[in-house]
Image (tube, rainbow, N blue to C red):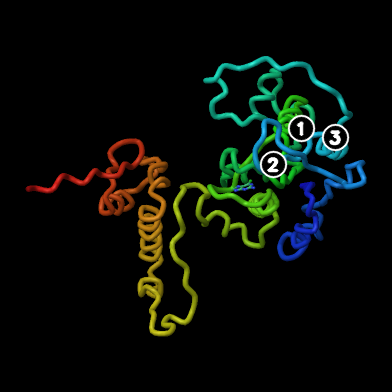
Amino acid sequence: MQIDIVSVFPEFFDSLHVSLLGKAQDSGLLDIATHNLRDWTHDVHHSVDDTPVGGGAGMVMKPEVWAECLDELLGLTAASTGVTPEKTASEKEKTTPSQSAAEEQQQPSGESLPGTVLIFPNPSAPLFTQQAATDLSKKQRLVFGCGRYEGIDARVPQYYAQRGVETREYSIGDYVLNGGEVAVYAMIEAITRLIPGFMGNPESIVEESYTGEPLLEHRQFTKPATWRGIDVPPVLTSGDHGKVARFRRDEALERTSRMRPDLIEKIETAALDKADRKTLIGLGWEVSSTHPRKRVPSPKHQ
Ligand code: 6GU
C-alpha cells in the first residue's frame, strides 16, 4: 500500500518510521511519503490560509494551493468542472459534501483512479470506525489531506469527488483537535495493521474489540498471580479452557453493557448462545427481539 500525507507539519509524521510501521516500510509492504503543503505555494509568505467567506473566527485553507498539490500527487491535470445540479434535502441526508458531490455528477466515486482513496480528516464528518479501517486496508493507495485552522475550503473534497476520485471525510471522535494530523495518524495505525502480513500474530486481530461482534474486550492479566495483594481472577489459573472462555465472554458482555450499552444494542440476538442470553438477561437486557433491548425498570410500588 502507498500512503501520501499532505500537511503543513510533515515532520509530525516522522515517528511513522519506527516500530511496526517502520518494519512494514522496510519490508516493502508499505510506502509512506509525507509532503509539505507549502511546497505548492508561490507567494513569498508561502501562505496556505485566508479569512472565511461570510465572516467568523479563524482561518480557512485556500483551495488553490491544495488543488495544485493534489493534482500533482494524483497525477491529474488541472481542469474545471461544470455546474452541479442540486439534490433535494432528503437525498442529501447522511452524505458528506464530497460523497454528495460525486453523486450529483452521476459519477460513481472512485471511477477515475481505481484503488486510490483521498481522505480528509474533518471533525464534522461521519465517524471513522473499524469497518472503515477494514475497508481502507484493502486499497492500493491512500492520500490524506490534513487541514489546520478551521479546515480546508469545502470545495476541495467536492472537486475531487466530482472528478471521480473516491473521496472520503472522517472524524475520529466527538472532541476537537487543533488539526487533522493526530486524526490521520490514528487512522493510519488502524488501517495498516489490518494489511495481511503486517502483524506478527494475525490472531490478535481476530480476538480484539470491534472485529466481528462489537464487544469490548475482557481484561488481560499476566504473571504473577498475586501482585501487591491483588489476585488475578482464580478461574484464569484453573486450566479449564471452557470455563476461561465463558468467564472472558461474560466479562466482555458485562463491561460492554456497563460502558458501551450502544454496542449491545447492535448485536444480532441470533448470534448469541444460550449462556450469552442468560448473562445479558442478568444484566437487565431483553433478548427476545432481533437486537437486545434494555429492560425498562418496573415502577416502584407505593
Ligand atoms: Cl478528523 N479533525 C479535527 N481537527 N478534530 C477532530 C477530528 C478531526 N476528529 C475528531 N476531532
Numbered tag placed on residue 151 in the rendering: 2
Numbered tag placed on residue 172 in the rendering: none
Residue placed at 38% from the left, 79% from the top?
231
Q: Nearer the viewer, residue 168 or 263?
A: 168
Which badge, 3 or 1, comes first in the chain's sequence? 3
Q: CA distance from mark 2 to mark 3?
A: 19 Å
Numbered tag placed on residue 114 in the rendering: 1
The residue under label 3 is: 71
Image coordinates for residue 270, horizontal then vertical, percent: 37, 40
Image coordinates for residue 219, horizontal then vertical, percent: 44, 65
Looking at the rendered structure, the kind of residue marked 2 is Gly
- Ligand 1 is within 8 Å of the C-beta of the residue at disc 2: yes
Tag nearer the camera, 2 or 3: 2
Question: Dot 2, crowdedness within 10 Å: few (<14), some or many (≥20)?
Answer: many
Q: Is residue 185 left or right of residue 288?
A: right
Which badge, 2 or 3, comes first in the chain's sequence? 3
- Quadrant position of residue 59: top right
Q: Is residue 47 left or right of residue 176?
A: right
Dot 1: what SS?
loop
Which badge, 1 or 2, comes first in the chain's sequence? 1
Looking at the rendered structure, the kind of residue marked 3 is Asp
Q: CA distance from mark 1 to mark 2?
A: 27 Å
Q: Is residue 219 visible?
A: yes
Question: Dot 3, crowdedness within 10 Å: few (<14), some or many (≥20)?
Answer: some
Residue placed at 61% from the left, 31% from the top?
96
Q: CA distance from mark 3 to mark 1?
A: 16 Å
Q: How many marks?
A: 3
> Are circles 3 and 1 on residues that touch, CB within 8 Å?
no
Q: Is residue 195 visible?
A: no
